[in-house]
């Protein structure tokens, strides 16, 4: 007698492809309204800016970020993205970030010659900042020792110098001042060249009418999944954004779970560091994604499930769609399931 077997297959969940002609087509949580509201806030901003869009893990930050970026481009704005988690294997996040920015220039609708010229210019002056980026990374990687004592190596050097007398003390102090002055000068040079590069990008976009009549020449840089990175990598990237990219016309938007990001900073700088005020040094404004109620999301899931007919069948559960939604919502809330887990 042949045994009848049900055929099941395991399939990895893949994010749906975005319809360029209908960007928010699958927006069941009305994230488009949030995008419009956030855009209005950022449009009126001036100067360099770092903004966080905070929401717990699994609540659709990446879904929102990808569609918001495309929406900004559709309305004539320069928007690029950087998935930090996909590159946290790299030693220096600045290298990974510049590499991604180099690639994203291909998708801004510029002429090939303008794109190539901007890419070459970006790589040429990016070399100036790489040394600083590596030093910033080393400081972050050493963690709490750096935070509490400016570095054990520095402390031991100073103590050794004191033991050798006044001449060595003077030599040590002058060396530290010279190093600081050199790094400060390099940082300033990097910022100046970055500012010139932004103006070149603006001119290139004008030549191709990329602005579509919109008087907003800022560059929006979306950084996603920073809170999933190695703690030292995440902090190093934050410091690079603050110290190297604080340039007129650059707007960084960080999509993060801020509670997790605070824990990362504590892992790097030690338990005595209060992560919340520390992040305030890097983030100028904070925005939040609203979360739907469990029952609201459950109604959507059940109503759009390919198994809906089976679930309401008398031979299976035999309950109404509303009852199934309520039960699903009850257990989802009971076990604090994220939107991603429920999906």
Image: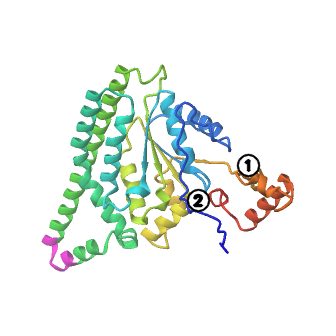
The residue beneath circle 2 is 57
Majority secondary structure in the magenta region? helix
Rendering coords of residue 244 (x, y %): 34, 47
Gap between marks 2 and 1, in whole Å? 20 Å
The quadrant of the picture occupied by the C terminus is bottom right
Q: Give the range drawn in magenta.
A: 160-168
- Residue at the spot 24% in from the left edge and 43% down from the top edge: 123
**Does dot 1 land on a helix, a strand or a loop?**
helix
The residue beneath circle 1 is 300
> Badge 2, how many Cα within 10 Å: few under 14, some, many 20+?
some
Rendering coords of residue 172 (x, y %): 18, 67
Q: Tell me if residue 251 comes above or below residue 238 in the rendering.
A: above
Rendering coords of residue 257 (x, y %): 56, 57
- Tell me if label 2 and label 1 are in contact, CB under 8 Å: no
Taking depth in this image into account, of 31 and 216 the one nearest to the observer is: 31
**Does dot 2 land on a helix, a strand or a loop?**
loop
Coloration of the structure image: rainbow
- Left or right of 178 on screen, residue 9: right
Q: Earlier in the sequence, mark 2 or mark 1?
A: 2
The answer to whether any part of residue 53 appears in the image is no
Q: Tell me if residue 212 comes above or below residue 9 in the rendering.
A: above
Q: Tell me if residue 81 comes above or below residue 327 in the rendering.
A: above
- Residue at the spot 21% in from the left edge and 65% down from the top edge: 173
The answer to whether any part of residue 5 appears in the image is yes
Rendering coords of residue 151 (x, y %): 31, 71
Q: Which of marks 2 and 1 is in front?
A: 1
Q: Does the magenta stretch include residue 166?
A: yes
């Amino acid at each position: 007698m042949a045994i009848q077997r049900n055929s099941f297959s395991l399939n990895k969940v893949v994010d749906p492809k975005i319809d360029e002609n209908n960007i928010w087509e699958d927006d069941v949580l009305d994230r488009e309204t949030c995008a419009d509201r956030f855009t209005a806030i950022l449009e009126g901003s001036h100067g360099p800016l770092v903004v966080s869009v905070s929401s717990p893990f699994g609540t659709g930050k990446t879904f929102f970020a990808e569609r918001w970026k495309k929406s900004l481009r559709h309305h004539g704005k320069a928007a690029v993205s950087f998935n930090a988690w996909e590159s946290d294997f790299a030693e220096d996040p600045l290298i990974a970030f510049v590499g991604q920015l180099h690639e994203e220039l291909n998708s801004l609708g510029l002429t090939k010659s303008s794109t190539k010229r901007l890419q070459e210019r970006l790589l040429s002056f990016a070399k100036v900042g790489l040394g600083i980026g590596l030093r910033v990374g080393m400081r972050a990687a050493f963690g709490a020792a750096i935070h509490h004592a400016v570095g054990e190596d520095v402390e031991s050097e100073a103590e050794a110098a004191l033991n050798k007398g006044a001449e060595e003390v003077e030599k040590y102090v002058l060396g530290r001042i010279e190093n600081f002055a050199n790094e400060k000068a390099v940082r300033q040079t990097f910022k100046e060249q970055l500012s010139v590069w932004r103006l070149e990008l603006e001119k290139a976009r004008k030549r191709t009418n990329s602005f579509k009549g919109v008087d907003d020449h800022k560059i929006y840089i979306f950084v996603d999944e920073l809170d999933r990175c190695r703690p030292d990598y995440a902090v190093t990237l934050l410091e690079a954004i603050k110290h190297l990219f604080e340039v007129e016309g650059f707007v960084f938007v960080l999509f993060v779970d801020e509670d997790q990001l605070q824990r990362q900073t504590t892992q790097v700088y030690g338990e005595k560091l209060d992560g919340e005020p520390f992040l305030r040094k890097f983030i100028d404004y904070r925005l939040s994604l609203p979360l739907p109620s469990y029952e609201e999301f459950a109604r959507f899931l059940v109503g759009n499930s390919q198994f809906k007919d089976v679930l309401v069948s008398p031979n299976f559960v035999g309950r109404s769609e509303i009852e199934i939604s309520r039960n699903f919502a009850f257990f989802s809330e009971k076990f604090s399931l994220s939107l991603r887990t429920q999906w």
